[in-house]
Image (cartoon, grey):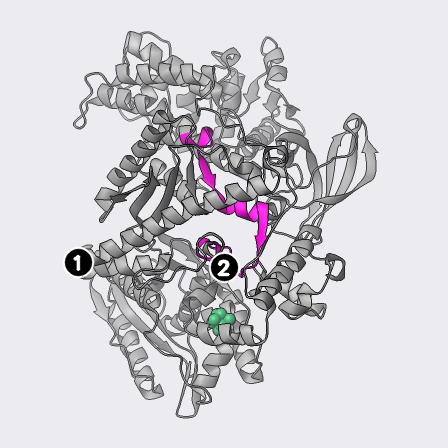
Amino acid sequence: MYESDNLLFVSPTDLTKYLGCRHLTHLDLAVARGELSKPEQGADEMLELLFTRGIEHEQRYLQSLRDQGREVIEIVHPKGTAVALREAEAATEQAMALGADVIYQATFFDGRWRGHADFLLRRDDRPGRWPWSYDVADTKLARRMKVPALLQMATYAERLTALQGVAPEHLIVVTGDRVEHSYAFADCAAYATTIRAQLVGFLEAGDDPRPQPVQQCTQCRWRPRCKAQWRREDDLSLVAFMTGAHATRLRDAGIVTVRDLGGRSAGDLPLTIGLAARERLTAQARLQLVERDSEHPAFALLEPQAGRGLALLPELSQGDVFFDIEGDPFLGDHGLEYLWGVVDHDAFTAYWATDLTAEKQAFEQLVDHLIRAWDADPGMHVYHYAPYEPSRLKSLSGRYDTRGAEVDRLLRGQRLVDLYTVVRQGMRISKESYSIKQLEAFYWGQVRTHDGVSDSLGSVVAFERWLADGGQALLDDIAAYNEDDCRSTEALRDWLEQRRIDGGGDSLYPRPQHGDGAASDAADELATELDRIAAALLAGVPDGGRDEQQQARWLLAGLLDWHRRESLPEWWEYFARLEKSDEELVADAAAVGEVSGTTEVRVEKQSTIWRLDFPPQDTKMGPTSDCLDPRTAKGVGTIVAIDAEQGWLELKRGTNRGAPDCRSLVPTSPIPDTQQRARLRDLGAWVVKHGIDSPRVQWRAARDLLMCRRPWPDRGPLRRPDEPAEQALCRLAAELDRTVLPVQGPPGTGKTWAGARTILRLVSEGKRVGVTGFSHKVIGNLLSAVVDAAADAGVDVDILQKAEEHERCAAPAVRCVPSAKDVEAELSGRVDIIAGTAWLFARPAFAEAVDVLV
Ligand code: SF4
């Protein structure tokens, strides 16, 4: 934003800033009007780094377009005057008229809004002013799409519409992992217009909203100024864990300073804030005032709770490991964990990954180190601070498909101990932040001050400098910082252990019971068997250049462990959620935290509906969600109604169970996939014994699918000349004999319509048809189409679906039963169509239960 020739020029970047922080827009406006000096440029190396990485990402995408042979016209970045901007837009228009494949740095200017789209991409199927037109593409460093990026592009798109005579269809965001995300301009145009009008209105009104900490602050050059203001005004944002929503509610209630808040009791605070949060905020403010007034740090232990806080600390052991990772989020497609540091037996070990290819090796070395340490000392635990370390172990084991079993064993055996969780659940400290650096005031007597690297952002900057210029001193600095973090984690563990002893020891804080990480005997047996079968399938299969049968065996060997690999993250997430505090669950969108106020609403047959209140929060839980109590991991009931904005829900549970006694609700555990794994095992074992291309009839369809073999390989084209696709499908499906016919087509091409008629024909020939799909919804759609097709044809079809009532097919003609056993009971009778997910058809009773599976 700036003024030139008495005009205020605004850009889509100002729109992004406005959405993130209105105070920032107010400050930028003051600079534009010459009422305030610009904040110092170049002071923040992290911002410079982000800028550099952003440019690199943009250049990489530009090069990839050139490599595809596309002709690129680049528009020279203009000066800021209206004349220069008009000229640059005219150059953009000229490049469009010439029909350039790609226009780089396209400039738009409508007299107030200026903007520079990274790329315009030509398309020939949407003519406007010319026989071609352009879509907008922007590169964004983030790996997740954010709304402001779309608003920016929608602003370019609006001006582009005027220039090319037709609206662009797509806004394409190229994220930092080089994935292109395409969005319909039509979906965001109206919203973008509204937000632009709001920004213009804000600028004209000249409002001065107060600064509030937001995510954008970390990348804002006004940060020092705002921080000084918060301190001067003793702003509520100085209270640790104060959220923007809580601060707003407190200010609305007339509580505006830390001192004011510290002098209140929880009952003085607005009831729209949950009780636990009200108690925490007042106590936290009070404790911070203690340090402020006494100039000595202070802490207070919280009420002991089983399995929470200090009760999470295991017995100390000689072989305990203290672990910390340094990661650079800007490198490669996923970031790079460049240093994995551990301290054990008083020695520091660093596993470096100074480039992307070394990351896998460093990860494996680290996991091997932890497993070795555990094998040598069964009482060992791995201590870390905050959830970054386990989350990286999980994601890298998946990304590189290595050490998954070892990571699972560490997690299953609860070897990783997050001291941040221990601190947050176990005590309050008198600090504005609960970072490990702040905690050091309690056990090292000071907050660390370093000449070299002193925080995680500094570590990233130092590593980036090393990548650019080299120099061992930089790596030494990073290593020293990482070792300090590991040793600080050890010192924190010892300090917490002492607090545990002083606070009551074993009687108040019983030690957690941690297992050996071994899977159950049955799971172990199955895993061993699957390994053995996979090894047999792979015998003689080369790494490359595989023939049809070798490829099929290689694929099957990989599939045997697929369900276990896929389910691991879900199980890890499930167990991590069970350990969260009620307050942490408020912030977890998968759960409902801090429920209270149980009231009976009504009785329905054998069930009672209870109303529970909770502080307003984002939650994905909705009607029909089955819930667990995280303290017991036992079922509480099923939500039948919920209003997350007002903060209430209705829970249904058996009347004989009485009122629910829980403080939070979490989703149930992942659904066991034992049957699917067992059937793959059966298939693998059969193939090992008889061969993938055995002439026997067993498993023929599955084997054909693995070999990508078309049915009737000796026949010519499957579809007759001029035969409509749906007729061909009907005819061929009826002829299928123990093989598989893949049908492919994008949405809207009539697969469901044709599938329904095919199913009817099969039924009319006396065959029993199975219908399956990834979800009950998908299955229900096809069943509805079958019911409609049967009505059109005037035929009677008996359809049985296995699904809960809320997931069933909408057509009343479909009979629905909740359990697989109910379906099994009907297998011997007349049922024309049986429908259910893979969980149903993988059961042993369903082998050969249908003639055709759709
Ligand atoms: S530091 Fe934060 S509050 Fe201040 S202007 Fe920047 S984004 Fe807004």
Callout 2, which amino acid? Asp
Per the image, label 1 sits on a secondary structure element best described as: loop
Front disc: 2 or 1 = 1
> Picture quarter containing residue 34?
bottom left
- Range of the magenta residues? 410-439
Per the image, label 2 sits on a secondary structure element best described as: helix
Q: Residues within 10 Å of mark 2 (few under 14, many from 20)?
A: few
> Picture quarter containing residue 710?
top left
Q: Residue furthest bottom?
A: 5
Callout 1, which amino acid? Gly
Q: Position of residue 118 (x, y in %)?
A: 31, 66
Eyeballing the image, is 172 above or below 540?
below
- Please tell me which residue is depicted at 79% across the width and 30% down the height of the picture: 658
Side (left or right) of 83 relative to 515: left
Q: Position of residue 189 (x, y in %)?
A: 49, 65
Eyeballing the image, is 774 above or below 711?
below
Q: Which residue is mark 2?
A: 187
Depth order, front residue of 758/47: 47
Side (left or right) of 748 relative to 459: right
